[in-house]
Image: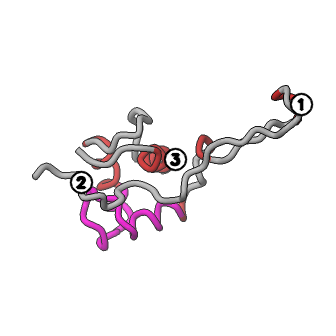
Amino acid sequence: MGDDGPEVTELQLRLNQSKFYFGDIDENFDEQVEAAVRGYQFSRGIADDEPGVYGVATRKRLESETNEPQSLRPTQASHPAENGRGRQRQGSHTSGKTGKTGKGRSSRPS
């Protein structure tokens, strides 16, 4: 239906923080995520993006109202020796881009 990947996971987690999405956190931009985006846009009066599409205006507003999801932040061992090598562990981190990325796929059926 739409984009998938870590950017969608971040979107799902942020929508969950805002109490608009309660579905699976599964990297898939499906109908439930689209409905959550649409509800969020409506509640905030966001008209610059097409309803249900996670565009620039929606992303900026959602990011300003939510914290970066914990699972997307780089992680470190609290004590370097905990990982057995004496070095801090590095987690993954996204580029900050989230949701619909304009890759040519639509969140709506053709």
Q: Relative to 94, say whether 70 is above or below.
A: above
Q: Is residue 11 left or right of residue 81?
A: left
SS class, disc 3: helix
Mark 1 and mark 3: Cα distance apart in space? 34 Å
SS class, disc 2: loop
Q: Is residue 19 visible?
A: no
Segment colored magenta: 40-63
Question: Which amino acid, by three-letter code, is at mark 1?
Answer: Ala
Mark 2 and mark 1: Cα distance apart in space? 45 Å
Depth-wise, is mark 1 or mark 3 nearer the camera?
1
Depth-wise, is mark 3 or mark 2 nearer the camera?
2
Farthest left residue in view:
110
The circle drawn on residue 44 is: none
- 100 magenta-colored: no
Q: Quadrant of residue 24?
A: top left
Choose between 16 and 92: the one closer to the eye: 92
Q: Are marks 2 and 1 in contact (CB under 8 Å)?
A: no
Q: Is residue 91 left or right of residue 109?
A: right
Q: Which residue is mark 3?
A: 17
Give residue 71's position: percent from left, percent from top. Answer: 60, 41
Mark 3 neighbour class, 10 Å CA radius: few under 14, some 14 to 19, many 20 or more:
some
Pick whichever of labels 3 and 2 is earlier in the sequence. 3
Mark 3 and mark 2: Cα distance apart in space? 26 Å
Q: Are marks 3 and 2 in contact (CB under 8 Å)?
A: no
Give residue 62's position: percent from left, percent from top. Answer: 47, 60
Mark 1 neighbour class, 10 Å CA radius: few under 14, some 14 to 19, many 20 or more:
few
Give residue 6's position: percent from left, percent from top. Answer: 47, 45
Q: Is residue 98 left or right of residue 87?
A: left
Q: Which residue is mark 1?
A: 81
Question: Which amino acid, by three-letter code, is at mark 2?
Answer: Arg
Farthest front residue in view:
85
